[in-house]
Image: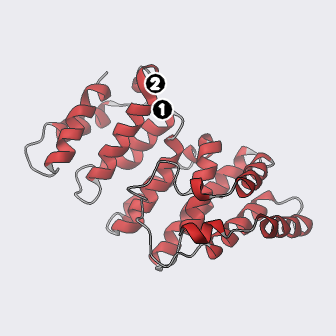
């Protein structure tokens, strides 16, 4: 995959953007959609990567992009308002799910989702109810659902409250399912680990009674629905959740 990302030509991307802008000068959502489609077609790795890029650094795969490509994407985001970016985030996540169900590559969409989530985390959060419904409809399709969890989870990279909201609403309902429990607990650990003390003090703004008791149940459950390593990780996380 490294090679296909490195071969992205910022000049070609700029030319595509210029052409689309000249034809649809008042439609920034179309500019973004065309760029995303271009990126997703161009990045087609021989081997399908892990749906959640497990084993890679947190900012993978955007860390593979050249500075020129990153700057082009950031500048394009900056030229759009939040409502356009929110619609585009929803488009990318929906397209990613649809394409993966068909067995097609979705790395290009994931790159766009990660870049947008890091730069503008607030725009994806407005779509969270839709993403929760989408998760419910695909949770029996493990690779695709893991892609969804990873994609929406990117919103919480730099914002504790956003990450906590995503974790509680989108991920915690899956905590008892063996295919997802490790990812869900690991994401929660990352959110509380990066959010730190000051962020954790705001936990009550998001954490409701229902969510708290769901976590409490699985933390102290003896049903064996969680593996021992995941249970130990959840035990370590629980004191932070109940602050």
Left or right: where 221 falls relative to 108 = left
- Compared across the picture, whether 99 is left or right of 9 comes to left
- Residue 43 vertical placement versus 226 (above, below): below
Q: Quadrant of residue 69?
A: bottom right
64 versus 82 height, above or below: below
| Depth order, front residue of 228/84 | 228
Tell me where residue 85 appears, x and y as whole percent.
69, 51
- Residue at 58 percent across and 45 percent down: it is 126
> How far is mark 2 from mark 1, CA to CA?
6 Å
Question: Can residue 133 be seen here?
Answer: no
In depth, the one of 15 and 88 nearer the eye is: 15
Question: Disc 2 on helix, strand or loop?
Answer: helix
Confirm or deny contact between disc 2 and disc 1 (CB under 8 A).
yes
Of the two numbered discs 2 and 1 on the same chain, state the one appearing first in sequence: 1
Mark 2: few/some/many CA within 10 Å (<14, 14-19, 20+): some
Asked if residue 241 shows in the view, the reply is yes
Residue at image mark 1: 160
**Which secondary structure lies at badge 1?**
helix
Residue that mark 2 sits on: 199
Left or right of residue 21: residue 207: left
Task: Indicate the quadrant containing the C terminus: top left, top right, bottom left or bottom right.
Answer: top left
């Amino acid at each position: 995959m490294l090679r296909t990302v490195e071969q992205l030509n910022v000049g070609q991307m700029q030319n595509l953007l210029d052409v689309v802008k000249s034809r649809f000068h008042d439609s920034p959502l179309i500019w973004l959609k065309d760029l995303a489609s271009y990126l997703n077609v161009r990045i087609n790795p021989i081997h399908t990567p892990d749906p959640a890029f497990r084993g890679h650094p947190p900012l993978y795969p955007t860390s593979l992009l050249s500075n020129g490509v990153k700057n082009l994407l950031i500048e394009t985001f900056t030229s759009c308002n939040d409502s356009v970016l929110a619609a585009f985030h929803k488009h990318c996540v929906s397209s990613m799910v649809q394409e993966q169900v068909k067995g097609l590559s979705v790395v290009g969409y994931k790159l766009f989702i990660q870049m947008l989530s890091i730069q503008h985390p607030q725009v994806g959060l407005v779509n969270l109810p839709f993403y929760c419904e989408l998760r419910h409809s695909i949770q029996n399709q493990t690779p695709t659902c893991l892609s969804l969890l990873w994609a929406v989870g990117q919103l919480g990279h730099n914002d504790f409250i956003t990450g906590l909201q995503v974790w509680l609403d989108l991920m915690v309902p899956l905590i008892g399912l063996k295919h997802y429990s490790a990812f869900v607990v690991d994401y929660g650990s990352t959110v509380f680990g990066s959010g730190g003390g000051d962020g954790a003090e705001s936990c009550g703004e998001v954490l409701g009674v229902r969510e708290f008791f769901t976590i409490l149940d699985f933390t102290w459950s003896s049903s064996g629905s969680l593996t021992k390593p995941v249970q130990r990780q959840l035990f370590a996380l629980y004191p932070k959740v109940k602050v």
